[in-house]
Image (cartoon, rainbow, N blue to C red):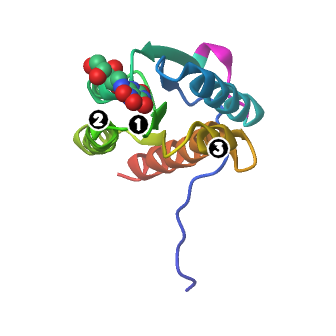
Amino acid sequence: MPHSVIEGHLDAKGLRFAIVASRFNSIITERLLAGALDALRRAGGSEQDITVVWVPGAWEMPVIALELAGSKRYDGIICLGAVIRGDTPHFDYVAGEAAKGLGQAAIQTGVPVAFAVLTTNTLEQAVDRAGAKHGNKGFDAAMTAIETAGLMRKLRAMK
Ligand code: INI
């Protein structure tokens, strides 16, 4: 007998997503949002299944993502932010808490949370990842959210 394979597909039809985007460094996050919406639409997602939630900064993301994930209204949460290193250790606290908190939101609720909070040393590095040299990490995060949310549905349907 062949081994069994379980995997998600890049099909967003019927899946509901919340996108959490930060206003801080909006010159970057608006590009990440455009990429994420492009991915969801191209994968067959419909407008009524997409909700965009704006937060002030990456620091505020975990508590909002946790609330959305716990609401049972979404199959996946896509988080878009940009933390750019300055001259003080502030960067490390904001980036570290965002990463840790978003991971916890996923684990505590069982709802996939895609992480596209850029952490870069310079604005140029962020631009490169928001639709320039290194692609668009918002697009990539939405694709992973679609795959993981679909996989989760499949696993739950097997119970
Ligand atoms: N928030 C970001 O999303 N990116 C940053 O680069 C950043 N820096 O550098 O300070 C940032 N700070 C704001 C933070 O997320 C909170 O909104 C603020 O501390 C108020 O709670």
Q: Is residue 119 left or right of residue 137?
A: left
Callout 1 secondary element: loop
- Considering every residue shown, the one lying at the far bottom of the view is 1
The picture quadrant for ligand 1 comes to: top left
Residue 59 occupies quadrant: top left
Q: For residue 41: magenta?
A: no
Q: Residue 94's spot in the image, x, y percent?
A: 30, 35
Choose mark 3 or mark 2, whichever is in front: 2
Amino acid at dot 3: Arg
Residue 38 occupies quadrant: top right
Amino acid at dot 1: Gly
On residue 126, which mark appears? none
CB of residue at label 1: within 8 Å of ligand 1? yes
Q: Residue 134's spot in the image, x, y percent?
A: 70, 50
Q: Label 2, on which residue? A: 90
Residue segment shown in magenta: 44-48
Q: Residue 82's spot in the image, x, y percent?
A: 49, 33
On residue 86, which mark appears? 1
Residue beneath the point at 57% across and 53% down = 8
CB of residue at label 2: within 8 Å of ligand 1? yes
Asked if the residues shown at circle 1 and circle 2 are in contact, with their CB atoms under 8 angstroms apart, the answer is yes
On residue 129, which mark appears? 3
Pointer 3 local density, CA inside 10 Å: few below 14, some 14–19, many at least 20: many
Q: In this view, does 37 lie to the left or right of 122?
A: right
Q: Which of marks 3 and 2 is nearer the N terminus?
A: 2
